[in-house]
């Protein structure tokens, strides 16, 4: 046997049950006085080994490329924010970039973390909980940006950084109930459907002040500001109008007596319209595709 190398004696260990490949072969050498045997990798095993090496290199390359692309995308967005703010006389540090990681794997979140992003937005409670559990040792501000059902509030009330989507009295009352139980104050944004599209959630603009007044009565809820989803259109004027409506409600609400302290956040603007949103006063932009790439939707 080859000196200094002792392969396992169990031959089944070195046998691929699917392909019936013997990974080791014995070669006998005969001389006048003795016979000795060495054990070497079979040709089939060498092929399998080379395939494994090539596959590993490809995986490493893809992972590295993905990390580089996410970092480059974040850099491009930050540079664009700086350029826009310079043009309109705003400070880029006043714009918070929220990485919308919904449906993206945990590896993508980790890649974005490497770029310095600390704020991540999720639309689904269970996915948010799963990712938070896996990344529990990381310093992350988790934002809930999807439609929030009252029966889901209790699952995130103890730790959520900011809820962007308070759109009804029932949801607000449940948040107060859970926040009081958790002995904390939960920061929220009231969601306004400024485009008044039937497919979207959010309070109507004409009812926004009424909802704000209702939410403001709760001692364990802090209204940080407002949120809207602009129309999915190439019409920049339509997007601009949507954001201006939210800014108008924001300004009006900050001048009424029932708002305990001035609201400071306007969460508006996504990949397709964040430039317009910033120009119209956004303080939070929610970016997914421009950071992580296109989403793959599984259809069962």
Image: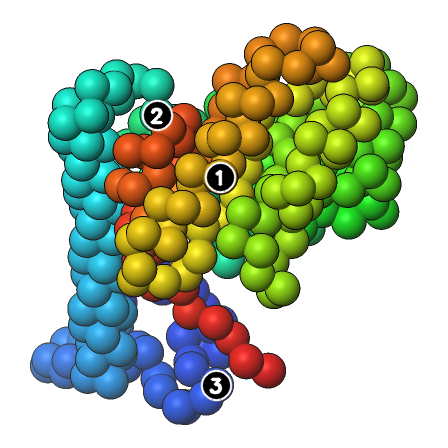
- Mark 3 in CB contact with mark 2 (< 8 angstroms): no
Number of other residues with Cα within 10 Å of mark 3, as a class: few under 14, some 14 to 19, many 20 or more: few
Of 297 and 49, which appears nearest the observer? 297
Q: Position of residue 168 (x, y in %)?
A: 77, 42
**Left or right: 103 in relation to 39:** right
**In the figure, 61 relative to 47: above or below?**
above
Any part of residue 135 in sight: no
Of 100 and 86, which appears nearest the observer? 86
Residue at point 52% right, 53% down?
A: 195
Closer mark to the observer between disc 3 and disc 1 = 1
Q: Say how the picture is coloured.
A: rainbow
**In the figure, 187 relative to 206: above or below?**
above
Residue corresponding to mark 1: 245
Closer mark to the observer between disc 3 and disc 2 = 2
**Image quadrant assignment for residue 24:** bottom left
- The earlier-in-sequence mark between 3 and 2 is 3
- Mark 1 in CB contact with mark 2 (< 8 angstroms): no
- The earlier-in-sequence mark between 3 and 1 is 3
Which quadrant of the rendered structure holds the N terminus? Answer: bottom left
Residue at point 59% right, 82% down?
A: 300
Residue corresponding to mark 2: 95
**In the figure, 18 relative to 272: above or below?**
below
Residue at point 89% right, 21% down?
A: 181
Of 181 and 202, which appears nearest the observer? 202
Q: Position of residue 234 (x, y in %)?
A: 30, 62
State the SS at label 1. Answer: helix
**Image quadrant assignment for residue 98:** top left
Residue corresponding to mark 3: 17
State the SS at label 3. Answer: loop
Any part of residue 298 in sight: yes
Number of other residues with Cα within 10 Å of mark 2, as a class: few under 14, some 14 to 19, many 20 or more: many
């Amino acid at each position: 046997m080859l000196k200094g190398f002792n392969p396992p004696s169990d031959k089944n260990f070195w046998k691929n049950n699917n392909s019936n490949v013997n990974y080791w072969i014995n070669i006998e050498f005969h001389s006048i006085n003795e016979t000795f045997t060495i054990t070497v990798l079979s040709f089939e095993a060498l092929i399998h080994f080379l395939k494994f090496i090539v596959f590993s290199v490809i995986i490493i390359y893809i992972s590295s490329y993905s990390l580089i692309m996410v970092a480059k995308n974040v850099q491009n967005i930050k540079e664009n924010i700086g350029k826009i703010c310079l043009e309109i006389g705003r400070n880029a540090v006043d714009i918070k970039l929220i990485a919308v990681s919904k449906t993206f794997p945990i590896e993508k979140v980790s890649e974005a973390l490497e770029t310095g992003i600390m704020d991540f937005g999720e639309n689904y409670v269970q996915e948010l909980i799963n990712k938070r559990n896996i990344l529990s040792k990381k310093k992350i501000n988790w934002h809930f940006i999807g439609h929030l059902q009252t029966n889901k509030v209790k699952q995130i009330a103890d730790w959520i950084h900011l809820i962007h989507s308070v759109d009804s009295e029932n949801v607000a009352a449940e948040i107060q109930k859970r926040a009081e139980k958790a002995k904390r104050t939960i920061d929220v944004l009231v969601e306004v459907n400024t485009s008044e599209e039937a497919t979207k959630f959010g309070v109507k603009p004409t009812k926004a002040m009424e909802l704000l007044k209702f939410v403001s009565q709760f001692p364990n809820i802090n209204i940080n500001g407002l949120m809207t989803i602009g129309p999915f259109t190439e019409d920049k004027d339509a997007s601009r109008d949507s954001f201006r409506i939210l800014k108008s409600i924001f300004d009006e609400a900050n001048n009424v007596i029932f708002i305990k302290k001035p609201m400071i956040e306007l969460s508006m603007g996504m990949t397709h319209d964040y430039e317009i949103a910033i120009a119209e006063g956004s303080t939070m932009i929610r970016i997914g595709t421009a950071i992580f790439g296109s989403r793959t939707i599984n259809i069962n």
